Image: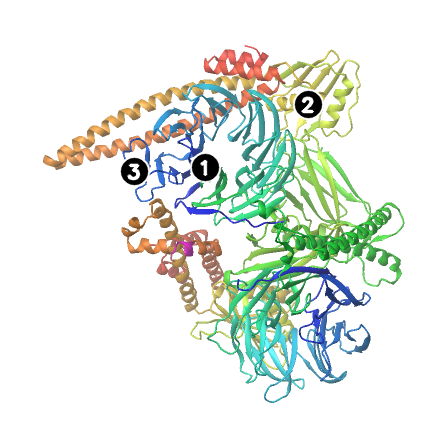
Amino acid sequence: MDKHIRPVFTLELGYKILAGLVTIGKYDGTHPCLTVATSTDKVLIHNPHRKVNNSNQVGKVIWSESNRELATLNINSMVTALAAYAVLPNVSRDILIIGTATNILVYDVHDNRDLFFKECEDGVRCVTVGNGQMILVGGNSSVHGYDHLGNDVFWIAVGDCVTSLSCLPDQKLIVSSEDFYIRIFKGGDLESELNETEAVSNLLGLPNEKFAYSVSNGTIGVYEKTSRLWRVKSKNFAISMLSYDLLGRTTGPQLITGWSNGKIDCRTLTTGEVLFKDTMNSSVAGIVEADYRSCGKCDLICVSIDGEVKGYTKTKAAAEGSNGIEQDTIKHLLSQKQALLMELKHYENNVKFNSNIMNETESYEARGVIPSNTRLQIVVTTNSDIETTSEAHVEVYICTNNSTIIKAVILFAEGIFKGESHVVHPETSKLASGMSIPLYLPKDVPIDIHLKALIGYPNSVQFHVFEITKQLPTFSMYRAKQVHVKPTSWVEFQINERLQRLCMWLNQNFILSEDIELTSEDHLELSLECLRDKTVLVIRFDISGKSVIFTDNIFLAADLVQCLANYLKIEGLESKANFPKEEENLKLLMQKLSDIQEARLKLDTDVADKFGQIRNLVVAAEDFRINDLTEMLECYRELDNVNKSLINGFNIKAQNYSEGIETMKSINNIIQKASRVRVGEFSTKMIGHCRNAIKNNNIDGLIKILRTGEP
Amino acid sequence: MELQLSRVDYAVVGVTNKNCLRLLPASTPKDQSKVAIADSEGILQVFSVKKNDIQLHFKTLPGPPIISLKVAGAAGTPNDKIFTATGNEVKGYTKKGKLFLVFDSGMTENINSMYVLGNELFLCGRHIYNHYRDCKDVGSYLCGDTIVDVIAFYMTKSKRLTSLIACESRMIRVLEHARLIASLEIESSPTVLHIYHSDDDDVKTVLFGTVDGQIGILNIETLQGFQRWLISNEKNSSPIVCMDSYDMSGNGQKNLILGRQDGNVEIYYVNVQDEMDSTSLIFLENCNESIMGMQCGIVAAPGYDEILIVTYSGRILGLTTQVTDANFDGSTGNYIFSSDTSTRINNLKGEIENLKMKLNKEREKYQESTMNSFMELSAISLIPINSTFILDKNNASYTLILEVPTAIDNILIECNCKINLLDVEKNTAVISYSKISHSKALTYILATYRCQINTNRIELKIQTTEGHKGVLQAYISPVLQPKCSRLLQFDIKALSLHYRVTEYSDLNRPFSELKLKGSFSLAEMHNWISQCLPEVPEKPDFSNDTTLFFQSSILNTVLVCIYKKGDAEFKSDNLMTLNILKEVLSVEATKKKIKLEFNLNINDECINHVIKIIEPRLLRHKEFLRNRELLEALNELEIVEEENVKYLSDKYKSILDKKSELNEHFKTYPDYLERLYESVINLHINYSKLKGLNQSKQKVDLLKMYLDNYSYEGILNLFLNGSETKEE
């Protein structure tokens, strides 16, 4: 049921605003100022409360001459993150934090001075403040924490580019990254990991251990701890989320979402039911909350990318008993009745048809009448004959139990198709009562597939829809295969569990043509082949509790360990790992990283050199202008050359930078995976050790940590 | 809006057909009228509204679908007899529900539309028009075209009984004594006819609604034909389904009320006499479902005018002038449910509970039947789907509207020829495209739309490409149990972006000609043409040479088809059109093993002509693109400030002024430029084919280059001196 709530104020900023980069700060401690990043590399501060006439301006902020309420801050490089928080100890005023691709600027707007300006090697993707006024910066593969002086005080490795950060109470931090994971950290410890179907773009911590998230494919939803309360998907995607009590409900605030098509909607936190919606003329850039009218109440402020600003406030009257409510109730009840009547009619007609079956003259096949005991059977296998040309895959075979045919199949599943569904629609000549659907699963995660099969006859105009939901096990893309040579890399750990139970785990998490049974008294061994790259995986459990996973893929090993620990509810697990290739790789990467850093230093001095030259040349050219024109031209020519080489240098530097980022990411990735072959505190401890080793550039130490978990 | 009306929902009936809701006049004009409604389950019911709840007077037993419902009475008696048409039968009921007439029309076709005037009865099938007086056949007329609506009235001056039939191929035919006295051509396909009575004098004006959302006035008295458009389709081009005239605003002048397929109910202030007095919209409400029937009168409460509406799924609702929130309690500031409404809500809840119980039993039974091994069948009646597939001339794309009387779960779209699915703002369904498993497949596109909850109606935009013909298949699966999926098919013709016109204005066009000779019959040729082109009448005109005119919605080029037995001639200023025609016709003829003799007369002037048509659009669009770039740069300046604008050149100022216009343009015509490029390139390919020249990739690349840096001479050169592609 939609309520209409009118905006309490609207204004135009007149600038193009970058989506997601909107914040609000009380830079003087009392008056909130809307702060946005523009598409022209500026930060815009809108201060409607500004006292005129302190024109003696120094520093970075430039107040607009014509619009007294606007001030700009030139950043001269694309702004990637924006936040305003009180980070100074015992000072209530907010400090503006601006992130660009490589730097972070922490700026005191009130005093018009930098608190610190720091280069972030890992880049800046998003910024938040939490855990006791610590500035948290999400980079390309890690999260760094800084104090108000710019000291590096916190670090955690994340597998991929961080897309969003949000703080929960109790020192908890939620991090989402481009590898589709949402990770919840407590202090430096990974508490839980949630897998989504695409990169999560936004996170919002909510009270009562809930948090809202939005995914770049258009989904938004709310988690409570690690279970999802609800989610909805739309064809647009969410830009910004905020919890605000727009409707003045006793049950607490609602979730306000701003969408890429300009829609703003207000949903309940617990069910996602839409309570109110409105639209802006263009995509929403951000939603914030502040007492913008100085009336003692916080308003909801929505900003669009075209600079349109709309303010809403808590509207209680509209929520309870709106004038159309009884009509709405009737409308709703009538809809319900209509649907029931229609279904009833279907059953009645079915009975009529059956009792009158002798007199039906027209072909019933065309109308999609099928025997009532028609069933759809489903079998999931890994395809066994690798001789066929097609890639190895998981095969879903479905068939009916009579002469009916399968006209089409729609498979809904997340993360394994380009869209959210996959359709098989055989040509008319190839219609049959059975078909097999190949599936390629890109990741080792359990997947629910919802299958809708259209069953009827080739010339039917209506089909019965059979629905089947099936969960594919986590490690579907592996099949049993006898191997003679075990991979050289392995993970070894000790678990105290009956072999029968481990046997069950294997059967549940792999697709095996027949369940494996315990044949030997003292050990259980299963050898498998990965369908993606034909690599070998051997899992061996001894009665003594010694367990070894042989695989060259450290990622797979990590996934297996985590899955097993989860199944057996193991809180902490220590393990030895031996991955010579990864170690070699890590060595190379570390070497490369230090090379890159060296090169960067050199490039920097080179640039400084060139700057000197330019300065000289400009002065010289100006001098020659008066008495020697040919010399002047010469000067400018040279200036042009220097400029060109400067641009060249810049390109090299840019490349050097992106290579550095890539290397850094790979290193962090390996460390992260290596930590995941351990469970619980052992994993956390290892990360800490690794960090120290990297700081000291101790490559051998690092490798030892990878192997044993200890320095 | 000038008018304030509030929506009241009354009841639900089965899925309804067009024009199956009428009001029975009350004894005095201020009293409440009864409502007669018929649905496709064959049930006719008459009810009145008392205290917001309905009181049923009578209800017939289910039967075959009722196609039309009219209310009439013999001269001198009140118009309170109800007539329903089913199959080829007409039934008459009194207002008490007594069946007084069962009349078998003896028509060979099923009745599509009906009109009753005193003791005169007019019935139309698809092609047959029949006129009965006192149930005796007094005349019939066979029409080569599909009849969509019929009305009849006595001419004001001559007092002669005249009937009008609206025909699908843009024609309204005037009949007297079942003889055609005039054929009035109109610019768009009509959907409904309506007689607008002015109150003051006895002047009748005939209005018609069109498939593209316009209302036109016919000049009937003088038989001059189309007079003018009363309401244009700039704002809304959804088809008109029904209309009524009634004084809703209470100022003594009749308003025009429209019901559209997109669920809009619109009230207009109109003046049919005076062209200078412009039409204005005074009320608009969207009901989310196609409006199928509508009449104005007094229904719920004495003295309050109301629009009574029935939607496609059978929802009966009213838009009333009565203020419904009268139950606002001033003393406490709260809204309370009035006791009437509360009882009504409770009644409804009770009904729903009963239904649920009944349904549970049925569900169990159905489940059991799927378990046992007897030879029982699962027969689910066909899910009714209201669909339209029409060409939107303005942006040369098709609009597919699908409407189901219950919520849709998902829609699967499959097509075997080249189409693009465009994004529709209103459509909230999540689309996902499926990979086509192997390249040799006949399928070109496979996509699913997963609908959001409570979506009954969905609108898709489909861009077709000329020269590719095929079938678009849509599988619509509602949420309703037991789950079913209904398949609908839509033809995509080879020249899908052409539409029929009655004539073309510009006679100075150069023409190329394609002449065909062979041993084909007129019917065969007619059939082939209808394979290529949309809106071709079902039957050819046997009497003389058939001539059809078509216009392209993308380039405005024309195509003239003149054909008879063994001989056909096609003229067009666009060679591409002729080439596509040639290809399709030869394929069709080969299928029938008929030898065709092609004779092509290429006028090179045509190339020049088509490029000249494209040129201004191309240049204009390019300028738009350039301006958009500039606009972005201009936005960098603090142009919000008066002072800064002063320093800008006139050109930049004008760009800023046209800001919204620019943005609007890009919204309405996405990838317009590509389509223009494509049409030039296709023209070149087709031209080369016709000329028998081999075309090469370099030439196409060169052409693209000329288009990018527009050079008229370059392009023309490339066309005419196909082989010489030298550059200076």
**Residue A566: numbered disc:** 2
The subunit letter for the residue under badge 3 reads A
Residue A595, placed above or below residue B403: above
Secondary structure mostly seen in the magenta stretch:
helix
First in sequence: mark 1 vs mark 2: 1
Residue named by callout 3: A53
- Residue beneath the point at 61% across and 27% down: A193
Q: Which residues are magenta?
A: B658-662
Query: In the rendered image, which quarter is residue A472 located in?
Result: top right
The subunit letter for the residue under badge 2 reads A
Q: Residues within 10 Å of mark 3 (few under 14, many from 20)?
A: few
Distance between the Cα atoms at labels 1 and 3?
29 Å
Residue named by callout 1: A21
Q: Is label 1 in a helix, a strand or a loop?
A: strand
Q: Residue furthest left?
A: A627
Residue B708 vs residue A219, the one in the foreground: A219
Distance between the Cα atoms at labels 1 and 2?
38 Å
